[in-house]
Amino acid sequence: DQQVKQNSPSLSVQEGRISILNCDYTNSMFDYFLWYKKYPAEGPTFLISISSIKDKNEDGRFTVFLNKSAKHLSLHIVPSQPGDSAVYFCAASVSARGADGLTFGKGTHLIIQP
Amino acid sequence: DVKVTQSSRYLVKRTGEKVFLECVQDMDHENMFWYRQDPGLGLRLIYFSYDVKMKEKGDIPEGYSVSREKKERFSLILESASTNQTSMYLCASSLGGVGWSGNQPQHFGDGTRLSIL
């Protein structure tokens, strides 16, 4: 049973426009959410995170929104740049459980078109 | 900057061999993790460790074991490699420690692409 779902395997966005990547989760115990970015032949790079006590976290061009009632989070990238082309993974954890690993979605391949 | 180093970028082994994947982090992190990444499946947790000589099973531990003799080093062991273990293996670490709440990002190495023939 997939607890973290990214239903769009790929997304194409024009340079300068907004990219919106979506993620849904089923485990109501998750209370910490992260987004990672991954280029080919490299490990995932931490991008931004949000705790379940918040509904928004912003860092430069990246904003993550959390809707707990809908068990949904999204990553907004504004404006999109060519270097943003990568695979984006949504991840979640139950922080009170200690040093458990993250539960990842399958990823969304973002393609920024010039 | 956190540096997580995996000893090999590419590795080719034969079925039945015992395979060791090594990972070292330089930030004195308490927690270390091993994942595998497969197309269409995302990243899946194999094992993790929150202290020296401590280990916990993740979601897919079958066919694997781990060793953590020193804080900075976490090894993944394929006891008898099989073709279905051909994958990209990723090591990660996070801070942990006294008072750790769990709200800490994990930092990843660049991965080892392992092929079992």
Image: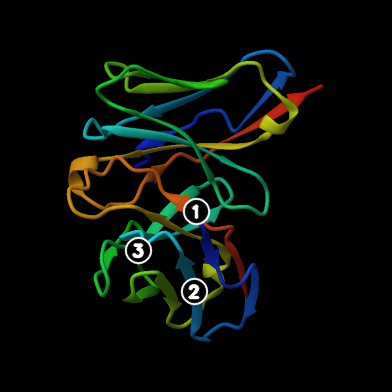
Q: Check disc 3 and report the residue beneath it.
A: B47
The residue closer to the viewer here, B65 or B33, is B33
> x%, y% of residue B73?
41, 72
The residue closer to the viewer here, B46 or B109, is B109
Left or right of residue B42: residue A85: right
Q: Chain of mark 3?
A: B
Question: Element under label 3?
Answer: strand
Residue at point 30%, 60% (across, down): B30
Q: Chain of mark 1?
A: B
Amino acid type of the residue tagged 1 in the rendering: Phe
Disc nearer the start of the sequence (2/3):
2
Rendering quarter of residue B38: bottom right
Q: Nearer the viewer, mark 3 or mark 1?
A: 1
Number of callouts: 3
Left or right of residue A14: residue A58: left
> x%, y% of residue A61?
57, 20
- Can residue A38 be seen in this snapshot? yes
Disc nearer the start of the sequence (2/1):
2
Q: Chain of mark 2?
A: B
> x%, y% of residue A34?
41, 35
Q: Check disc 2 and report the residue beneath it.
A: B22
Query: From the viewer's perspective, is residue B113 above or below residue A1?
Result: below
Alpha carbon separation for disc pair 2 and 3: 13 Å
Q: Quadrant of the N terminus of chain A?
A: top left
Alpha carbon separation for disc pair 3 and 1: 14 Å
Q: Are marks 2 and 1 in contact (CB under 8 Å)?
A: no
Residue at point 75%, 18% (across, down): A15
Amino acid type of the residue tagged 2 in the rendering: Glu
Q: Quadrant of the C terminus of chain A?
A: top right
Q: Check disc 1 and report the residue beneath it.
A: B108
> x%, y% of residue A27?
26, 34
